[in-house]
Image (cartoon, rainbow, N blue to C red):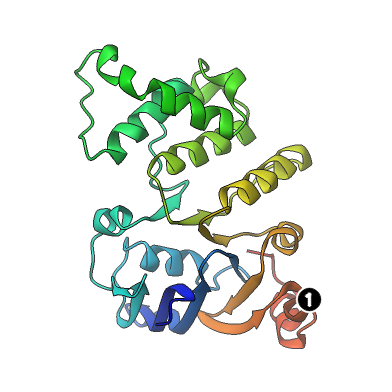
Amino acid sequence: MTADYILETRGLTKEFKGFTAVNQVDLKVRRGTIHALIGPNGAGKTTCFNLLTKFLQPTRGAISYNGRDITRMKPADVARLGLIRSFQISAVFPHLTVLENVRIALQRSRGASFDFWRSDTALDSFNERALELIEWVGLSDYAGSVAVEMPYGRKRALEIATTLALEPEMMLLDEPTAGMGHEDIDRIVQLVKRVSAGRTVLMVEHNLSVVSTLCETITVLTRGQVLAEGDYQSVSTNPEVIQAYMGTAHG
């Protein structure tokens, strides 16, 4: 693995009782870029994400992160190395405020356990940094709002804030704009651009307009295998990619 690539898989394979969900996937994510994983429904994208973040163990193959073999590591150990999956492991609690959520994520990043029995004052030391992150994702007006009561797009921004509190070097974003209207999509696209400064982003995304706007490299999966890879122009005009999407829902 060269220093240019922060994440690399070799022959990554996952089988479920005779069904091969991910089949011999070789993936290289260049450091400091935004890389998309796309493909029709059932292509294996989510399984691939679960393998990378260690929520699933591969049947065969290897995963390297920053030159280190993480194939058999546990999810928490991989997260401590700076490989963080947003929207899945973020510390977002629906009935706590935005500020409370980000403070808890900051507490976690310092290696402390979730000491819920402690008084609010125990978390006050995290206020300044929490408010900085809240402002950074455009939620200053929502700091005192309960998460469950916020608009959908703002909840996603909160999830990004709690992920940033874990100080990731690489973020895996799982369908960051799913279910959003145009205004929220535009807001999240701009936020992902900001988030990507100084770090690497790998994202699964249905919205090909978002992919074309954000991503330098796109890997297309179909039936668990890599079908094509390149920039948006080359991938979107590839006859095999067009054929794979014909008659299917994008997913």
The local crowd at label 1, few if under 14, some if 14 to 19, many if 20 or more residues have their Cα within 10 Å, is few
* Image height of 143 relative to 81, above or below: above
The one nearer the camera, 177 or 218, is 218
Instruction: Answer left or right for 213 relative to 12.
Output: right
In the rendered image, residue 102, in percent from the top left (x then y), is placed at 42, 30
Total number of numbered discs in the rendering = 1
Taking 107 as reference, is 20 above or below it? below
Q: Nearer the viewer, residue 213 or 135?
A: 135
Height in image: 17 above or below 97? below
Which is nearer the eye, 132 or 163?
A: 132
Q: Is residue 94 visible?
A: no
Which quadrant of the figure has residue 71?
A: bottom left
Label 1 residue SS: helix
Q: Residue at x 49, y 78 (%)?
A: 28
Identify the residue shown where x is 78% and y is 76%. 233
Whether residue 90 appears in this view of the structure is yes
| Residue holding disc 1 | 233
Residue 43: name its quadrant.
bottom right
User: Which quadrant of the figure contains the C terminus?
Assistant: bottom right
Q: Position of residue 203 (x, y in %)?
A: 56, 60
Residue at (23% x, 71% y) in the render: 72
Residue 75 versus residue 200: which sits nearer the camera? 200
Provide residue 126's location: percent of width, then percent of height: 35, 25
Residue 62 drawn at (x, y percent): 33, 80
Quadrant the N terminus occupies? bottom left
The relative height of residue 234 versus residue 163 in the rendered view (above or below) is below
Residue drawn 42% across and 48% down? 88
* Residue type at tag 1: Gln
